[in-house]
């Protein structure tokens, strides 16, 4: 029956994923964005619902659609929709921002009707608004509905059984041509008769010039469409320009303005209004040095340009278009591609990392804005590896920053095997402390980061741009990840990026008002010019597998149909089974051919022989039960652990070259070989004390071979438990808790290469406990409390564990303990994140 149970669970998950797939599609933004007065007439957008012939709709029909305006444009005037009755007269809904009130007007032929109204700006520009126009030829009236408002116009001489051309935006139809259109978005156009849907244009396409109609297949035609779904998936190139000399870039998120600091002018691009301008400097051309960067301080509304290696910072005056310090030429910078951030906490500008003269940096400098002074910061906590090409993002106040990835090495010397870095570091300004949070799980090609991360405090997520730094014709790819876990997702399309090391620069910004990402690339040419490219992407970004909603819904019904059919077949099959295998020893059902369990229970109170314990610190017991851990010198211990973990986790061990890279990276090839040979011999002698554990190189890789039938290794047992969460049961959870109860994985040992293992194990343990807690396999409150406590030992501010424990305590009637658990959690949350937890106790229990 276990096999049958698995099949049912697979089918259930199949259906569940399908439903999630559908819900995701329903949640996506879609529609058409209409290009307006910001472009030339022949580039503006129009939609013809019936390009081949007019729609004959009888005496009465309803036309409805969703409307939203795009903010921050100069001109708001034009036709939203034009209906042409029997090719004889026009009936229009027009918007005119020039009038003092009632900007929406309904026009019949050449006459303003009595229908005039407004939609509040916070609704018109920030949400979809449904409008419905009801044509009633029988009573000769038109009724317009918007929200709760209703407007009626009579005496229009509407003809019965008329046929209509229905045109949104611009059109070139006969004498009814129009080119005026407000900057707007339209979606979900529907036509109904007698309360039955006759036509439906969702406008959920991603590309093309066809607006698919889903009821009668009466497809519409679109001119110059900008599909909303595509704007969430495909980066839009909005500007490219070449400026003289060296250039740097900064961004004001409140005004949504991008600043390009050039040699002779400050260039400004308004993202929301799509306006570009430039102002020449009052004092003429400036001498920008190679490696110059710029940054905008949103706290004091000031633009800065800087060169930290020379402790040079200058402010820009927007009123008289000048810098408050003179730029002077100097030596080549030591801090290419460094990261920077402002902290409101101590009114300072910080600089981290960088590269120059064959050296990677991990230096931190602090510039005090109030008194124009500098000092070096001595960071505490975890080691911040020297690097450049990292991504950095800060919280709203700049009191906590996250530094992700980069390229460098422990020593900082470029000659000593530099590599890509994938750890996520958190730096808190208050105590100047680094904390390594996790290491990214990277399965594909290596990559580095554009200069900035976009941090979402509310959802504890980040966005960044990655690119393979080993080739010139590269591409930037947006990723979205968690601030607490190493997984990440690729979002949106790629951006072309010519990466020529210190000649190139890329950055990422976010516009909170217009809800879009901005990517900027700079490339300095040999003739001392800088090419600037600007791209935008609507938020939330979609993955590249986004497809039209109607297609997703169609696929969903096929998927559900297949799943239901499989369940019916399985049910018939089960009904015909006459016999079941029964264990003569237990009387329970068994599965024929089921292998013996590969999970061994471990009792630490018994005398331990032939065992390797890694959770809670390293302990090694030989065949006689003697703890031989003390005989492992620091180097032998690291050699043993690296070979052991690579052998168990990946099943193949590791090469001599990889061992040299990890343990003897600072030695010559000959010296590394000699050190390896000596220490391998010492390790073999120690392992010989255990009867079923041997070091070999039979496959060309150094590997520790273990007979798990006679030897216990807690890490091997752990992997067998977590590898298939669908088979979890209370017995396995108890085995896992026995393993983790000893403590965190190798808690008293710190190696750079070990961080990947520790991060993976911590996340897998938490995921396993949470998966079982949510699986419905147990409703025992006491057991759920234990599960939550296990999770807290790995993550003291795990919100799901807190909710599980509070609910379980409440179910037992221990309400004061539940409240104490919640209060302890929010205190710990405040200490770690330096912000208040957003939920209260009662909402947690709901």
Image: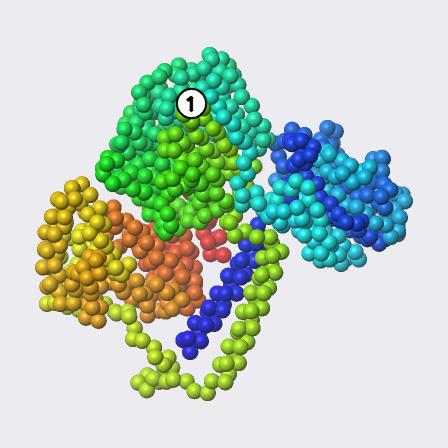
**Residue annotated with mark 1:** 528
Name the colouring of the figure.
rainbow
Residue 516, relative to residue 375: is it above or below?
below
The quadrant the N terminus occupies is bottom left
**Who's the residue at 51% across and 33% down the image?**
534
Q: How many marks?
A: 1
**Who's the residue at 57% across and 45% down the image?**
230
> Neighbour class for label 1 at 10 Å: few (<14), some, many (≥20)?
few
**Secondary structure of residue under mark 1:** loop
**Who's the residue at 33% across and 47% down the image?**
439
Tell me residue 346's x, y (percent).
Answer: 36, 28
- Tell me: 358 left or right of 728: left
Q: Camera-side residue: 28 or 279?
A: 279
Tell which residue pokes out farthest to the front in this image. Answer: 527
Residue 29, relative to residue 734: is it above or below?
above
- Tell me: 76 left or right of 507: right
Residue 120, relative to residue 562: is it above or below?
above
Q: Camera-side residue: 287 or 241?
A: 241
Q: Quadrant of residue 176?
A: top right
Q: Camera-side residue: 464 or 547?
A: 547
Tell me residue 609's x, y (percent).
Answer: 15, 67
Tell me residue 400's x, y (percent).
Answer: 37, 37
Tell me residue 765's x, y (percent).
Answer: 33, 58
- Tell me: 182 left or right of 114: left
* Residue 87 visible to the viewer: yes
Tell which residue pokes out farthest to the top in this image. Answer: 283
* Residue 398 visible to the viewer: no
**Who's the residue at 50% across and 44% down the image?**
493
């Amino acid at each position: 029956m276990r096999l049958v149970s698995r099949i049912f669970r697979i089918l259930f998950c199949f259906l569940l994923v399908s439903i999630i797939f559908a819900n995701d599609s329903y949640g996506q933004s879609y529609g058409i964005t209409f290009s307006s007065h910001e472009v030339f007439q022949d580039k503006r957008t129009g939609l013809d619902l019936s390009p081949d012939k007019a729609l004959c709709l009888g005496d009465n029909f309803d036309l409805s659609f969703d409307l939203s305006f795009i903010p921050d444009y100069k001109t708001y005037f034009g036709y939203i929709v034009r209906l042409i009755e029997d090719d004889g007269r026009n009936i229009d809904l027009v918007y005119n921002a020039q009038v003092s009130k009632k900007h929406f007007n309904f026009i019949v032929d050449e006459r303003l009707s009595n229908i005039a109204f407004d939609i509040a700006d916070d609704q018109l520009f920030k949400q979809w608004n449904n409008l419905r126009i009801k044509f009633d030829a029988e009573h000769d009236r038109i009724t317009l509905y918007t929200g709760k408002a209703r407007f009626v116009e009579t005496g229009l001489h509407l003809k019965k059984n008329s046929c209509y051309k229905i045109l949104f935006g611009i059109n070139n139809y006969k004498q009814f041509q129009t080119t005026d259109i407000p900057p707007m978005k339209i979606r979900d156009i529907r036509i109904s008769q007698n309360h039955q849907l006759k036509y439906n244009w969702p406008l959920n396409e991603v590309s093309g010039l066809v607006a698919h109609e889903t009821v009668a297949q009466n497809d519409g035609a679109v001119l110059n469409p900008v599909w909303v779904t595509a704007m969430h998936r495909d980066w839009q190139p909005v500007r490219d320009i070449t400026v003289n000399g060296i250039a740097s870039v900064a961004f004001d998120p409140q005004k949504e303005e991008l600043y390009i600091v050039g040699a002779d002018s400050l260039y400004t691009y308004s993202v929301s209004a799509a306006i570009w301008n430039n102002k020449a400097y009052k004092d003429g051309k400036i001498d920008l040095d190679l490696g110059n960067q710029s940054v905008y301080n949103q706290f004091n509304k000031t633009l800065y340009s800087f060169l930290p290696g020379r402790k040079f910072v200058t402010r820009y005056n927007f009123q008289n278009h000048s810098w408050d310090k003179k730029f002077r030429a100097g030596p080549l910078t030591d801090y290419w591609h460094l990261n920077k951030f402002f902290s409101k906490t101590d009114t300072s500008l910080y600089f981290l990392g960088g590269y120059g003269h064959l050296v990677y940096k991990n230096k931190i400098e602090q510039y005090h804005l109030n008194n124009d002074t500098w000092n070096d910061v001595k960071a505490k906590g975890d080691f911040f590896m020297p690097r450049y090409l990292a991504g950095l993002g800060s919280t709203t106040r700049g009191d906590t920053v996250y530094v992700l990835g980069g390229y460098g090495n422990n020593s900082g010397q470029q000659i000593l095997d530099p590599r890509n870095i994938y750890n996520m570091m958190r730096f808190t300004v208050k105590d100047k402390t680094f904390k390594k949070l996790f290491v990214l799980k990277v399965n594909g090609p290596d990559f580095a980061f554009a200069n900035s991360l976009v941090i979402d405090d509310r959802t504890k997520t980040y966005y960044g741009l990655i690119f393979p730094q080993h080739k010139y014709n590269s591409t930037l790819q947006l990723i979205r990840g968690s601030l607490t876990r190493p997984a990440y997702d690729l979002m949106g399309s790629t951006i072309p990026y010519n990466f020529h090391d210190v000649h190139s620069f890329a950055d990422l910004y976010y516009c909170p008002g217009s809800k879009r990402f901005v990517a900027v690339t700079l490339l300095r040419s040999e003739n001392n010019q800088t090419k600037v490219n600007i791209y935008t992407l609507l938020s939330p970004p979609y993955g590249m597998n986004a497809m039209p909603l109607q297609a997703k819904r169609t696929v969903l019904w096929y998927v559900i149909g297949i799943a239901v059919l499989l369940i019916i077949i399985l049910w018939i099959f089960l009904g015909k089974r006459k016999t079941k295998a029964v264990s003569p020893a237990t009387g329970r059902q068994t599965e024929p051919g089921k292998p013996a369990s590969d999970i061994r229970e471990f009792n630490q109170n018994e005398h331990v022989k032939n065992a390797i314990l890694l959770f809670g610190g390293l302990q090694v017991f030989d065949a006689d039960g003697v703890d031989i851990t003390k005989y492992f010198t620091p180097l032998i211990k690291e050699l043993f652990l690296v070979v052991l973990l690579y052998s168990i986790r990946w099943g193949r061990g590791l090469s001599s070259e990889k061992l040299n890279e990890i343990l003897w990276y600072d030695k010559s090839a000959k010296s590394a070989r000699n050190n390896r040979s000596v220490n391998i011999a010492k390790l073999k002698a120690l392992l010989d004390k255990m009867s079923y554990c041997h070091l070999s190189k039979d496959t060309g890789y150094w590997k520790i071979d273990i007979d798990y039938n006679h030897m216990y290794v807690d890490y091997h047992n752990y992997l067998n438990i977590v590898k298939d969460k669908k088979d979890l049961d209370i017995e396995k959870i108890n085995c896992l808790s026995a393993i983790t109860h000893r403590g965190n994985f190798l808690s008293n040992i710190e190696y750079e290469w070990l961080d990947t293992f520790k991060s993976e194990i911590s996340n897998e343990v938490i995921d396993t406990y949470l998966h079982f807690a949510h699986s419905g396999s147990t409703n025992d409150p006491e057991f759920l409390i234990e599960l939550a406590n296990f999770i807290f030992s790995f993550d003291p501010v795990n919100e799901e564990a807190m909710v599980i424990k509070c609910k379980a305590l409440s179910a037992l009637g221990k309400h004061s303990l539940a409240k104490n658990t919640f209060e302890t959690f929010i205190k710990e949350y405040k200490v770690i994140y330096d912000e208040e937890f957003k939920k209260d106790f009662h909402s947690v229990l709901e």
